[in-house]
Image: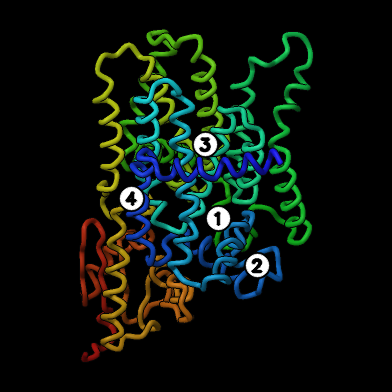
Amino acid sequence: MAGRENAERLIPETMKFLLSRKFVFFFIPYLILYLLSAHNALFWDTLQFAGDHPTWYYDTGFRYLLLPDACDSGHPPAFGMYLAFLWKLAGRSLWVSHTALLPFIVLLVVQAIRTGELLFPQQKRYAFWATLIVLSESVLLTQCTLVSPDICLMAFFLLALNAVLSRSRGQLAVAVLLMAILSNRAIMVAFVLYLFRLSYDRQFVPAYGGRLRYLLKQVLPFLPGALVAIAYFSYHYYVKGWIGAPKDSRWSAGFEIVAPGRMALNFLVLGWRLVDLGKVATFLVSAYLLVQWLRKKIIVPDDRRVLVISFAWLLAGLLVFTALPLALYQGLLTHRYFLPVTTVIALLAVLLLAVAPLKHKGPIFRLMVLVQLSGHFWTYPRSVSQGWEGTLGHLYFYGMRKDFLAYMQQRGISKGQVASSSTLMQSGKKIDLTNDTTAFRDFEKDTVQYVWYCNVSNAMNRTVGYYFKHYEIVKREKKGHVEMILFRNPAYPQRLP
């Protein structure tokens, strides 16, 4: 009876919060982005996680737990199964896929607000800035326009973080379990949160003896998720004989350790990712305040010391276990991979700025938010890889793609005559969730009459100079920073429209 009464009391409290001005203020931008992108095609890595994975379960009727090697990149498959389940209920469409992420966007916003309140229970001003800086991060905003599992990861990460801060074991167990069935990266983030909990609750360590008992007690909320993850990977290895990615898959190169020279370059790229797309101000403020704190120029009050130290350890743990290892491999330094790291950097900046002996803190907070939002307008020359999945500047891509598809159809240009990259070449079944199974040709393997280029494909940016020199431009369009061109190979006879 007590549990039922608590549940009945929780529902109206939750509804009251979701209708509050605070939630509405932070949620409206995300709702607008959802409405603008609810029918957009799948983009970049979402072709695998929101396309291949759920399509397999949808087509096979959930007869198999494991994915086929052709689309199995080693992650737990819960995200794909979730989308496939909703497709069975409401139909296989882009709208259903985007809408499937809406509850997690709500959870993300709710938990970001909760994080601010837990960090600054008596200081509403700093609680507001903590929430705003987290939610205005360009990569996070952009991921919310995609059918991206990283939205779930960030929602669960903040849910688990808040559970540690509020010492809610049940909430922590649920959050970790959700992370365990989401992705390998989420599992590593959950492990770092265990280390964070050890630091945050270390005042409860017995002075004499009992340390092992303390460690075991702290790990209890993590055990359900750990056991589920161990069971899945054990079964996966038993059936397939590998964990991570099959040797002959298209992901295998990403799991090969690079040469020392390339590794050094990757560490520089990693540093660039942490400041790219508008994060430079937040990073510099956090780094400066950390140095000042270590030099004892900033004195953290006794009642905040454990909190600040624990967040510093959380940042170090995320860097060591989820960020730095990626520099050892080829092609794994994607912006979205570092969302937990950059979120903790932002929160640490707010924590230290709140206790820093500075008179004018408001302009610094506003600067961090504005510079983060400016990330949507950052662009680089074609020869430099750009994180298009981390900037809203890529939103022009979808309308331009439809225009070019209509143009080619009107002029009788078949898909077999056109080569492009993975961002554009996929069939309608894979990228638009339609029944069209015909794909374009691969520009890296096939020489055909036309080449369809868009600068959101970093792979094509390395070769587009050749097309400008040796091919004819049939159609060219540029909106914002997105450019799309249809080239014609002059070696083929021109067809009259």
User: Which quadrant of the structure image shows residue 457?
Assistant: bottom left
Three-letter code for the amino acid on which mark 1 is drawn: Ala
**69 lies left or right of 476:** right
Dot in front, 1 or 3? 3
Q: Earlier in the sequence, mark 4 or mark 1?
A: 1
Three-letter code for the amino acid on which mark 3 is drawn: Leu
CB under 8 Å between callouts 3 and 2? no
Three-letter code for the amino acid on which mark 2 is drawn: Pro
Q: CA distance from mark 1 to mark 2?
A: 18 Å
Q: Residue at x 27, y 62 (%)?
A: 396
Q: Answer few, some or many: residues within 10 Å of disc 2's Cα (few below 14, many 20 plus, some between 14 and 19).
A: few
Residue at numbered disc 1: 253
Secondary structure of the residue carrying tag 1 is helix
CB under 8 Å between callouts 4 and 1? no
Residue at numbered disc 2: 68
Q: Earlier in the sequence, mark 4 or mark 3?
A: 3
Q: Residue at x 54, y 24 (%)?
A: 313
Dot in front, 2 or 4? 4
Residue at numbered disc 3: 324
Q: Position of residue 439 (x, y in %)?
A: 44, 78
Dot in front, 3 or 2? 2
| Vertical relation: 182 (above or below) 435 | above
Q: Earlier in the sequence, mark 1 or mark 3?
A: 1
Q: Earlier in the sequence, mark 3 or mark 2?
A: 2
Dot in front, 4 or 3? 4
